[in-house]
Image (cartoon, rainbow, N blue to C red):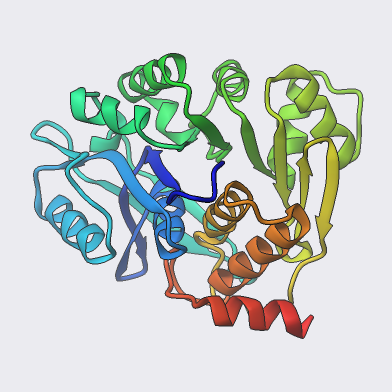
Amino acid sequence: MSNDKKLKAVAFGEVLWDIFDNEKKIGGAPLNVALRMKALGVDSNMISCVGNDADGEAIIKEVNKLGLETNTILKSDNFPTGLVNVTLDESKSATYEIIYPSAWDKIILNEETRELVVSSDVLIYGSLVCRDEVSREALEELLNHTHTYKVFDVNLRKPHYDYEILQHLMQSANFIKFNDEELMEISAALDSPYNTLEENMNFICSLTNATAICVTRGKDGALLLWDKHLYENEGYTIKVEDTVGAGDSFLGALVTSLLNGKEPQAALNFACATGALVAGSAGGNPEISIFDIENLINKN
């Protein structure tokens, strides 16, 4: 990507309320990625759908407040705004009950959303939005008819995925992000003979057109396969508040850094520190400064 113009990104998929006990926080993996990229100076946009209800109005208001345009977050009269019940275990890792159907399951493209993707440098999409045929067909149209750099954020949430669809989504991507469990599960489903993360990253590359793959490993950092070279970060020590959105902010920081020309190891370090700081804060979109990120990197 050119360094002489501002990077322009668009995320496609779910916007919703994460419900923790009695508290609601705005969420949805693609929105979290877009918000982190926005915080890092990228011209970010979101394509989604909310219900024509109080929860939808509140999301539009919150997204506006966080600095994203909302004219491509559509409204549905027939389906409610998305809600997810989040449960944290003793290690603060999250499990999710994702209400179906929700408005974001029913995203329909219009001229404005199509033009937005064509004019963007990066399209970020995940697997969860493909649980419903309506949103899946809209995403497939975008993947098939645009030459934008495509970033696929694998986000396995049982029972909302299917290996055949996952394979198609991987085939469309230039860049794929997994966590370690997702990589091993999908590789096994595709009959991989390999047992290590690195071998399976190369296995996925051999089956797809992706030229970059990253794998997050929780507190143990991440691996990045970029231009046929493997880079590793072993993680940063942080007191975990909750893991919600940590991988999303990691991805937003990594894609922003790499496409703005940062050296891959430095980009991976920056992304891992960003993800760690999100895990050390409540909710998926805490405010984090560049100073805080660099300070954590330098402390380790």
In the image, residue 225 sits, relative to residue 258, either above or below, namely: above
Image coordinates of residue 10 in percent, x first then y, are 38, 41
* Front-lying residue, 55 or 36: 36
Which residue occupies 90% across, 40% down? 196
Q: Is residue 196 left or right of residue 71?
A: right
**The one of 134 and 84 positioned closer to us in this rendering:** 134
Location of the C terminus by quadrant is: bottom right
Q: If the image is split into quadrants, where does the N terminus sit?
A: top right
Q: 40 or 36, which is in the foreground?
A: 40
Q: Image point 68% across, 20% down: which residue?
A: 209
Residue 230 can be seen in this image: yes
The answer to whether residue 188 of the structure is visible from this angle is: no
Q: What residue is drawn where x is 18% and y is 54%?
A: 60
Q: Is residue 85 above or below residue 132?
A: below
- The residue shown at (42%, 48%) is 97
Q: Position of residue 25 (x, y in %)?
A: 33, 65
The image shows residue 129 at horizontal and vertical percentages of: 41, 32
Q: Residue furthest front?
A: 4
Q: Which quadrant of the figure has residue 204?
A: top right
Report the side of 166 relative to 202 (left or right): left
Task: Give the x, y percent position of residue 14.
Answer: 35, 42
